[in-house]
Image (cartoon, grey):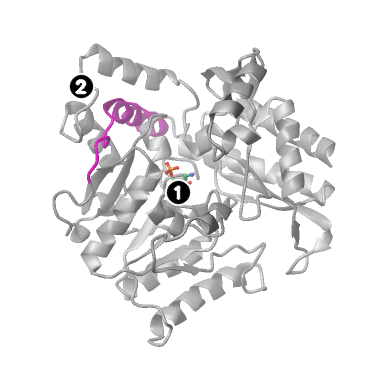
Amino acid sequence: LNEKYLKQQEERESNARSYPRRIPIAIEEAEGIFVKDANGKTYIDCLAGAGTLALGHNHPVVIEAIEKVLHDKRPLHTLDLTTPVKEEFVSEVFDSLPAELAQKAKIQFCGPTGGDAIEAAIKLVKTATGRSTILSFQGGYHGATHGTMALSGNLGPKQHVQGLMPDVHFMPYPYAYRCPFGVGGDETHRISAQYIENLLNDPESGILKPAAMILEVVQGEGGSIPAPVEWLREIRRITKEHDIPLIIDEVQTGIGRTGELFAFQHADIIPDVVVLSKAIGGSLPLSVVIYDRELDQWGPGAHIGTFRGNQMAMAAGTATLKYIKENNLSQHAAELGEKLMLELSVFQNEITEIGDVRGRGLMVGAEIVDSRIPAGLKGTYKANPELASRIQRECFNRGLILEVGGRHGSVVRFLPPLIITENQLDEVISIFKDAVRAAL
Ligand code: PMP
């Protein structure tokens, strides 16, 4: 059956499809951390909709919330007109923010994707500042529209599309394993912050005063790279001193995944703009921008569109947020993430092709290398996307779905639902180890 579906997919679907190529599966059913394919084989899903499924598939509280919308005869579509479901969602989101941000925050509902919300954030800051330049980061990922693709770092598809949004400059992200300054360790983030500050202080830098800086606290698609807390604090200080709005893209990191409800909370900083999508819709499409009301200088209609505020997604999102807070799933993600990284680090001692293990909470990556070919810093080796793909395939054959990403396509990424239990995580680790040995 799987084969039949996959053949039809091959014939009918676009050449641009991506995940289906790496994960050749037709999913018929799903529950919790598991999906079942058309042949009845079960897989553990550690891709989880690229980090969307915080509560896994079809969690009872999510299903209940969706059924309630239907049962109560709530409207399914209202553009972005107010409804009780929307009011409850907004209150839940505001209650979840750090008080200092909640007090001054405004919220804008965006189209159903993370990319649309990033577009909104960029228009917001450009309007408020009257400036155009955006500072983004090498390896960052913010979406696939003309604007968000322009903001994204070293990803292949960009080079084939002419005329992306102009005036984006890429700053060095504190990626210590492949340090952009060739030093590594803590020096990487110190020099990165110093470099950015020097650049902003230099009237001859060649870069016009930015409308914003945008970053992920843990780069997701870029390869599960966590930014050190000290660096984030420095970036917040520098952007504040230079009056540059700081946009934190929490599309993937948000809602508990990294061990805090919002990843910026690790550094105790308050951003000017926060972008949320993926998990905030409780499995359904939803995205929002939350920002300091001082920036609220755009006019009516500045960011419009038909589908902004899917009622079922709001209900599912409210239920998800409540469940995460009530069950302290952020803490759970922090603890299991520590365990996962520790075990992968021990395994790294045995397998020289695992060049780096890193992450924060349940957003973890293992960078796969060719240990025969040194690259850059001492102890750093050439990225090995072929081996990473083979590992992904061996995991898949053993019933484990994982994502492969990173700047060079060489990072095996673990993004399990936050509800994963310790025993289930042990099984994930065990399958991964077998798969690595088989792929070598
Ligand atoms: N920002 C980040 C950090 C993301 O991880 C993603 C999606 N992977 C996006 C933005 C874009 O979201 P979407 O695919 O829903 O447009």
Q: Quadrant of residue 94?
A: top left
Inspect this view and state whether residue 346 appears. Answer: no
Task: Say which label, 1 or 2, has the lower sequence index.
Answer: 2
Q: Is residue 106 visible?
A: yes
Q: Quadrant of ligand 1?
A: top left
Is 104 left or right of 440, judged from the image as shown?
Answer: left
In the image, what residue occupies the spot 81% across and 50% down? 349
**At x 60% / y 45%, what residue is drawn?**
364
Q: Quadrant of the C terminus?
A: top right
Name the amino acid type tagged 1.
Answer: Ala
Is 116 in front, or is 53? 116
* Highlighted magenta segment, given as a residue range: 304-326
Across and down, in percent, residue 121 comes to 31, 54
Badge 1 is on which residue? 144
Choose between 61 and 19: the one closer to the eye.
Answer: 19
Residue occupying the far front of the picture: 11
Which quadrant holds residue 200?
bottom left
Pointer 2 local density, CA inside 10 Å: few below 14, some 14–19, many at least 20: few
State yes or no: residue 69 in magenta: no
Amino acid under disc 2: Pro
Judging from the image, what secondary structure is the residue with disc 1 in? loop
Return the x and y of residue 49 as percentages of the image width and height.
51, 33
User: What residue is shown with label 2?
Assistant: 75
Q: Is mark 2 within 8 Å of ligand 1?
A: no
Picture coordinates of residue 321 (x, y %)? 36, 33
- Label 1 lies in ligand 1 vicinity (Cβ under 8 Å): yes
Q: Quadrant of residue 432?
A: top right
Does residue 390 appear to the left or right of 9 in the view shown?
A: right
